Amino acid sequence: MTKGAGSRVNVSSKSRYALMALVELDLRTRGTGQPVRLADLAREREIPEQFLEHVFAGLRRAGLVAGHRGVGGGFTFVRQPDRLTVLDVVRTLDGDLRVDVCTPGECDVEEREGAGVVWRAAGAAYDAVLARTTVADLAEREVQLGAGPTYQI
């Protein structure tokens, strides 16, 4: 295997955990729309609950999920999972994505180097993949792979 084969993209823990929990929320709310407790999402996906509270606060402020208080409370989607893209989640939690190939103050060099166009194209391709992949797509993939639980009524 050559060096670089099987490359990975580094995603923040916030985005990674958010997507794991949102997939779980999608699987649990399919057909019911009933709120799911954050503690249940955290336990099922083995995510520290306090960290997930922080993550979901950001998602709630951005209008991606809604929190419901009281008995039977929890979280539901504001934007349906088939309309909520991975890019929406990542940008909400991490800001705009970009491919960094220069140190601060040297980015004008990137404009003069031939490879600069490659780095910009790589960033655009990364955004495009995240923009066309939804939370529902990820949940369906887990179901197909048998990786996630299936909830049926």
Image (cartoon, rainbow, N blue to C red):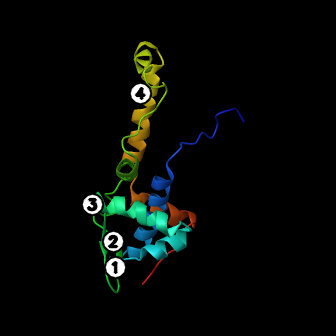
Q: Which amino acid is tagged 4?
A: Arg
Callout 4 environment at 10 Å: few (<14), some (14 to 19), or many (20+)?
some
Q: CA distance from mark 4 to mark 1?
A: 42 Å
First reached walking from the N terminus: tag 1 or tag 3: 1
Residue at 33% of width from left, 57% of height from top? Answer: 84
Which residue occupies 46% across, 26% down? 119
The spot of residue 34 in percent (x, y) is 34, 79
Q: Secondary structure at mark 4?
A: helix
Disc 2: which residue: 76
Mark 2 packing: few (<14 Cα in 10 Å), some, or many (20+)? many
Q: CA distance from mark 4 to mark 3?
A: 30 Å
Viewer-nearest of discs 4 and 3: 3
Asked if labels 3 and 2 touch by Cβ distance under 8 angstroms, the answer is no
The residue nearer to you, when weighing 147 against 76, is 76
Query: Circle 1 is placed at which residue position?
Result: 34
In three-dimensional space, the C-alpha distance between marks 1 and 3, rounded to whole angstroms, equals 17 Å
Q: Pinpoint residue 45: horizontal percent, then vertical percent.
A: 54, 68
Q: Amino acid at mark 1?
A: Gln
| Residue, disc 4 | 120
| Residue 69 percent coordinates (x, y) | 31, 79
Name the element at disc 2. Answer: strand
Task: Give the mark, 2 or 1, whose residue is nearer the N terminus.
Answer: 1
Q: Which residue type carries mark 2?
A: Thr
Could you say which disc has been placed on residue 63 in the image?
3
